[in-house]
């Protein structure tokens, strides 16, 4: 379960505000099957392909966020996160896609409707919104991935113990790892810091950005198993 929090930080308000969406994420068939290790391999491949396309755009949004940061330390975090998305995570995805454990690719993948909408929104937010609002938009990808990864690591522990080479093992262990959990905690802290100096109107915009990005998180997971094809060209 994507656990609730009880302190009075602004991000705790955001977490509570998105409770219905997070419950829907908890209940997704995609995540249940992934945790059980029974998700069809072709579905997991579709998800990894879309996530690779997403990371390319997300890294750009984080780089733009770094450029807007209020101090060098904050900029360094967003910049290193951008580099990690562009290099480390993308390399893991490429290994999964080319390692032979998943079905072969049928042509070049293209963005799903949800993937394109999500990355376009994040890049637009980073380009046109204030630093605080753009940071709030970027936060769900850190925080929800960390929560999902932690819970999947628990539910998939027996699967991985039985078969350490299971195609899903590398993905699950990466996002459940302490390093990724710490990155999510740092992103939260930076959004809290931004909220402290933001106006009431800006905090409202931060909340809307966080909610919208959380909606996209839900859709992104779900459409891997239940795709929404583009109209034929």
Image (cartoon, rainbow, N blue to C red):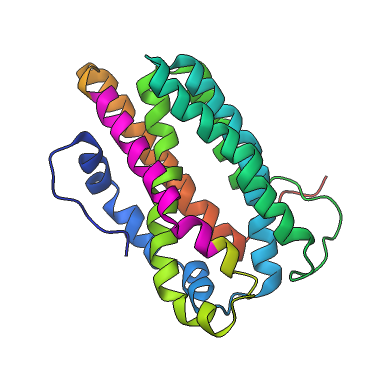
Q: Is residue 36 above or below residue 203?
A: below
The residue at the point 35 percent across, 37 percent down is: 186
Residue 43 found in image quarter: bottom right
Quick check: can you spot residue 116?
no
Q: Position of residue 177 (x, y in %)?
A: 45, 57
Which quadrant is the C terminus positioned in?
A: top right
Which quadrant is the N terminus positioned in?
A: bottom left
Q: Position of residue 115 (x, y in %)?
A: 61, 45
The residue at the point 55 percent across, 85 percent down is: 162
Direction from residue 185 to residue 212 in the image, left or right = right
Residue at the extreme right: 107
Quick check: can you spot residue 57?
yes
Find the magenta span and give its range.
172-195
Q: Position of residue 192 (x, y in %)?
A: 26, 30
The residue at the point 70 percent across, 61 percent down is: 96
- In front: 184, or 179? 179
Direction from residue 196 to residue 26 in the image, left or right = right
Residue 139 found in image quarter: top left
174 in the magenta segment: yes
For the stretch drawn in magenta, what is the main secondary structure?
Answer: helix
Q: Is residue 64 above or below residue 93?
A: above
Q: Is residue 158 above or below residue 200?
A: below
Q: Position of residue 195 (x, y in %)?
A: 25, 25
């Amino acid at each position: 379960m994507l656990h609730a929090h009880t302190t009075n930080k602004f991000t705790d308000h955001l977490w509570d505000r998105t409770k219905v969406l997070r419950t829907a994420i908890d209940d997704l068939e995609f995540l249940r099957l992934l945790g059980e290790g029974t998700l069809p391999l072709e579905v997991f491949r579709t998800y990894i392909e879309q996530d690779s396309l997403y990371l390319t755009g997300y890294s750009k949004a984080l780089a733009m966020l770094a450029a807007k940061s209020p101090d060098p330390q904050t900029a360094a975090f967003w910049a290193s996160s951008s580099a990690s998305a562009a290099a480390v995570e993308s390399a893991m995805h490429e290994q999964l896609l080319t390692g032979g454990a998943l079905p072969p690719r049928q042509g070049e993948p293209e963005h799903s409707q949800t993937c394109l909408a999500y990355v376009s929104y994040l890049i637009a937010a980073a380009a046109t919104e204030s630093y605080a609002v753009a940071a709030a938009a970027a936060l769900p990808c850190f925080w929800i991935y960390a929560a999902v990864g932690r819970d999947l690591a628990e539910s998939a522990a027996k699967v991985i113990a039985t078969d350490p080479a299971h195609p899903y093992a590398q993905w699950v262990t990466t996002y459940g790892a302490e390093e990724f959990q710490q990155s999510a905690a740092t992103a939260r802290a930076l959004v809290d810091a931004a909220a402290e100096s933001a106006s009431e109107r800006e905090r409202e915009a931060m909340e809307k950005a966080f909610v919208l990005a959380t909606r996209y998180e839900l859709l992104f997971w779900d459409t891997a198993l239940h795709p929404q094809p583009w109209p034929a060209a």
